[in-house]
Image (cartoon, coloured by chain):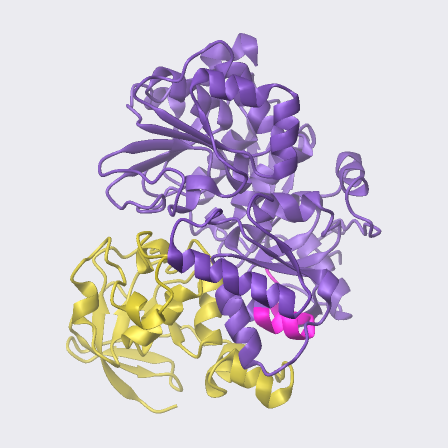
Amino acid sequence: MRKEEHFARRLKVQDNINTDYVISGRYKFRIQDPKELSKHIFEDIDPEFASRVKKGDILVAGENFGCGSSREQAPQALKIAGFHAVVAKSFARIFYRNAFNLGMMLIESDTSFIDDGDTVEIDIDRGRLEDVSKGLSFEIKPIPSVMKKLLEDGGVIEHFKKYGGFKFDE
Amino acid sequence: MGKTIAENILSNHCGLDVRAGDIAICDVDFCFGQDGTSSIIIDSFKKLGVNKVFDKEKFRMVIDHSAPSPNIGVSEIHKKMREFARDFDLGLYDIGCGVCHQIIPQHGHVTCGDLVLGADSHTCTYGAINVFSTGVGSTDLAITLACGKNWFRVPETIKVIVKGRLPAGVYSKDIILRIIKDIGANGATYKSIEFYGEAISALSVDARLTISNMAVEMGAKAGLMEADNNVLKWVAGRSKREPRPVRAGLGARYAAVKQYDISNLSPQVAKPHTVDNVSNVEELVSTKIDQAYLGTCTNGRLEDMEIAAKILKRNKVHPDVKFVIAPASREIFIEASKKGLIDIFIESGCVVVGPGCGPCVGTHNGVLADEEVAISTANRNFKGRMGNPNSFIYLASPATVAASAIKGKIADPREYRKRL
């Protein structure tokens, strides 16, 4: 995978961002259209947030991102909002699977020093995340090979169609 | 060397000897979706290009999250689920049947030693009856619906030992809130938890389900217990399949071992807006409340209804409080009615709504206004969970919720200990 440059979008609240924060209780189940949902991401904790997101941005969060409900609308809305990836100190497990299943990359790394608007470079092969604006470099926790395979295939549905089941090297 | 319950169940379902950290492709015994997740299950299933489900008897859909439907958007989802069920000849529990995590074990779809996936995060509930059950997203569920399998990373396990005897007025909900306070919302992420100890063995199966239900609030993948005689009796009366109880082997490796003594435990209350923000009830008495809720997959069972009724009998709900009650299933509703509990609830001023998730998910049956405060027997108190980000949710046992509804403020249920 090649090195890519992105803008960081840091959430005001960092830890324990649950799926009810990604999609507010006001909209869950009421709105089905993922495009419409993506306009309201994080509305309850930062009403202006969605309007600042540009295609290719990287979402920056703290510990236990995506905890709570199994609702796949959460990673789906983030993907459709334009996020290339989410970088967090840790992820809740259902969200973790859901994101890779949809072909969206999640990166575990120290995010304490990344500010909103910083330019960030991700180098998966070298396992580094660079904050270009600050001249800082962080180690990325290796992405498990199963997740890498799902990303390469464009998500679990494409993977399944390609192999007629699961095909992992392990 | 012995294996943990999680390692044993996953090994049994992939035909290999797998250990924590391994990736296993396993056969799944049962899977399901609810009305918040089934729409994407159906879409993803159709995208896979298969024309039948792997086994009709091993899949159900449940309409519980917004039942009956509060708006057109939800009505369309319900219609889509009913049409999918009809087209593929699949079982569906429609409105009024109850909450998925009550009706799936109650109707015998799962038994000891099973591996179960649900498109709902609280699928970990059946760990109390020795089932490795875990929540996944809709697309993961659709894959299993198509092929009967999924992949699992075998989790490490935290062993939790609960000692002592529960004091009067203190319940399994208080035990699990105490444990979550200690382990934290992130403390068991990607891991399985095994619960042991005399305090767990002394609990009814209903009360144990409350504990396993909340394992996910620590990030856990499963919250497992051994199958003792109570569990074997419980599943024998419900499931037609032969149970295959699974224990941890001698020398099984644990990531951590935690011990708790609950002999002097106070009723516990989780404060807004995280489940691990827990205090003893004494510190919160006099916090004014506007709404109380008894129900959900955590505490909507018959035993929970009985505890609340003992406190509410010949008492009145405070005039400033709306007390909503939703039995977790139709069968619980009928039993509660036969026992006269429903009469007690209605006479005391409660509103009893149909079986289902009720106001827990924030779509209907009691959405909070700005600045309103609720005390609920549910498992989550996230900002906006009950439909309004400007409201406040406290979580507690059925006893604490009932006592608080009478007082109009958070109250210590031990005040009613002579009734309990």
Residue drawn where x is 50% and y is 38% of the image: B179
Which of the two residues, A62 or B34, is positioned nearer the viewer here? B34
Is B10 located above or below residue A20 in the figure? below
Residue A2, image x, y percentages: 34, 91
Q: Can residue B410 be seen here?
A: yes
In the rendered image, the quadrant that contains the C terminus of chain A is: bottom right
| Image point (56%, 45%), residue name | B99
Left or right: A157 with respect to B363? right
Chain depicted in yellow:
A
Q: Which quadrant does the N terminus of chain A fall into?
A: bottom left
Specify the segment rendered in magenta.
Answer: B142-155
* Residue found at x 62% / y 43%: B102
Q: Which chain is purple?
A: B
Q: In which quarter of the image is residue B282?
A: top left
Q: Residue furthest right?
A: B242
Image position, residue B335 (x, y; %)? 66, 28
Instruction: Say whether residue B144 is magenta.
Output: yes
Pick whichever, A153 or B362, lies toward us: B362
Q: Can residue B169 be seen in this view?
A: no
Asked if the stretch drawn in magenta spans residue B302, the answer is no
Q: In which quarter of the image is residue B410?
A: top left
Left or right: residue A145 versus residue B234 is left
- When the figure is inspected, residue B328 is found, relative to residue B314, above or below; the finding is below
Q: From the viewer's perspective, is residue A122 above or below residue B319?
A: below
B34 left or right, relative to B334 = left
Vertical placement of residue B206 versus A104, above or below? above
Residue A49 x, y percent position in the rendering: 19, 64
